[in-house]
Amino acid sequence: MNRSDRQQGMTLVVSLVMLVVLTLLVVSAIRFGNINLRIAGNVQSETEASAATQVAIETMVKTINTTPNISTLATQQMTVSTGGRDYTVTVVKPACIFNKNINNSELDPTKAGDLPCFETTDTEKLITANNTLTTVPTACKNQQWDVLASVDDSAKSGAKTSMLQGISVRVGAEVQCP
């Protein structure tokens, strides 16, 4: 047997080894691509769910600003479309966390927003034992409310998120802060 016959057999073995290595590289590239695609899909679903909760909170804030008595609002479920998918968002009944009476001295009668807070046009105040004028609580209060919205789309996209936002509002004296 001469030397060139042995080298031809070695070429076959080297080319088979190279083919196996190349196949392994292609398979691993495909697997990494699929993993990255799943990660991007999960991030997109989570971002869409967060956007849906923010839209639901903004809708609730608009409702709070137009409702005369916030404490009468109930828990709501709303469907929010983000363009890619519809999410069902649960907005929990707003919770009052802070209540502060507003005194007449803090109001400006020239501002239209302050006018409903004046109960009467009587500007006389009582005099305390220290000879200082008293300030009378008005018909308004400043309150802080928390609005909590959450999405649980575990069955479809796997997205699950919650968002809490505080809102400060001026309300009438009839609105109770439990």
Image (cartoon, helix red, strand yellow):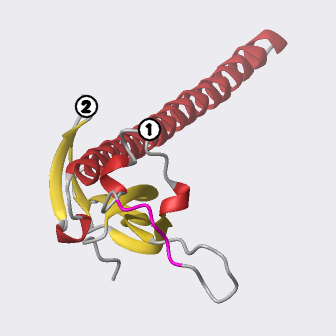
Q: Residue at x 27, y 45 (%)?
A: 62
Q: Main secondary structure of the magenta part?
A: loop
Q: Is residue 24 above or below residue 7?
A: below
- In the picture of the structure, the residue carrying the numbered disc 1 is 110
164 to the left or right of 63 = right
Q: Nearer the viewer, mark 2 or mark 1?
A: 1
Q: Which disc is residue 84 wearing? A: 2
Q: Position of residue 15 (x, y in %)?
A: 66, 20
Q: Amino acid at mark 2?
A: Gly
| Left or right of residue 52: residue 101 | right
Q: Nearer the viewer, residue 34 or 38?
A: 38
The single residue placed furthest to the right in the displayed view is: 3
Whole-angstrom CA distance, mark 2 to mark 1, is 49 Å
Disc 2, SS: loop
Q: Quarter holding the N terminus?
A: top right
Give the extent of the magenta segment: 122-126
Q: Position of residue 77 (x, y in %)?
A: 16, 58
Residue 69 percent location from the top left of the image: 21, 64
Between 116 and 12, the one lying in front of the other is 116
Q: Residue furthest top?
A: 4
Say left or right for 176 vs 128: left
Residue type pointed to by label 1: Thr
Between 19 and 31, which is closer to the camera in this rendering? 31
- For image coordinates 17% across by 61% down, the residue present is 76
Q: Is residue 177 magenta?
A: no
Q: Would you say residue 123 sits in the magenta stretch? A: yes
Could you tell me which secondary element the residue under label 1 belongs to? loop
